Amino acid sequence: EIASSVGIDTEKYKHLYPYIDENIVFKRNKIAHDEILQIDSDDFVQITDRILDLLRMYKNDIENIAALKSYLKNWSKYI
């Protein structure tokens, strides 16, 4: 909802939702609930790389929206 409210096209992220839920959120929840989480170094590197890729994509979207001021077009929907 936050992404859409500022004009980020979430369609290009939808194919990543299962990965985010099954890998990132699942592991985060295990840690948050004080459960033991064992991952090997290859898995750690893969998850870290994917998270950094997602953050870069999101950052680029936000920077483009700010530069183009396209967030102003979407704001009227939420007033």
Image (tube, rainbow, N blue to C red):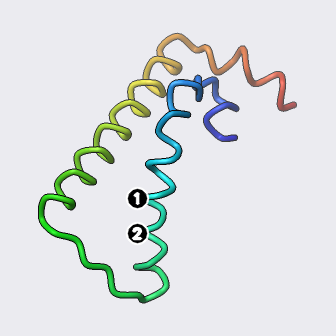
- Of 34 and 72, the residue lying toward us: 34
Furthest-left residue in this view: 41
What amino acid type should be assigned to the residue bearing mark 2? Lys
Compared to residue 42, the image places residue 14 above or below, namely above
In this view, the residue farthest toward the right is 79
In x, y percent, where is residue 79? 87, 31
Task: Identify which residue is drawn at 65% across, 40% down.
Answer: 2
Residue drawn at the location 64% of the way across and 21% of the way down? 71
Is 79 above or below relative to 23? Answer: above
Looking at the image, residue 34 lies above or below residue 6: below
Can you tell which mark lies on residue 27?
Answer: 2
Which of the 4 image quarters holds residue 70?
A: top right
> Is disc 2 surrounded by few (<14), some (14 to 19) or many (20+) residues within 10 Å?
some
Q: Nearer the viewer, residue 37 or 73?
A: 37
Q: Residue furthest top?
A: 68
The secondary structure type at the circle numbered 2 is helix
Residue 68 point in image, percent of width and height: 52, 10
At mark 1, the secondary structure is helix
Query: Pointers 2 and 1 in contact (CB under 8 A)?
Result: yes
Residue drawn 47% across and 66% down? 26
Q: Is residue 24 left or right of residue 44?
A: right
Residue 60 drawn at (x, y percent): 39, 25
Q: Quadrant of the N terminus?
A: top right
Residue that mark 1 sits on: 23
Real-space Cα separation, disc 2 to disc 1, in angstroms: 6 Å
The kind of residue tagged 1 is Asn
**What residue do we see at 51% from left, 47% from top?**
18
Q: Is residue 25 above or below residue 1?
A: below
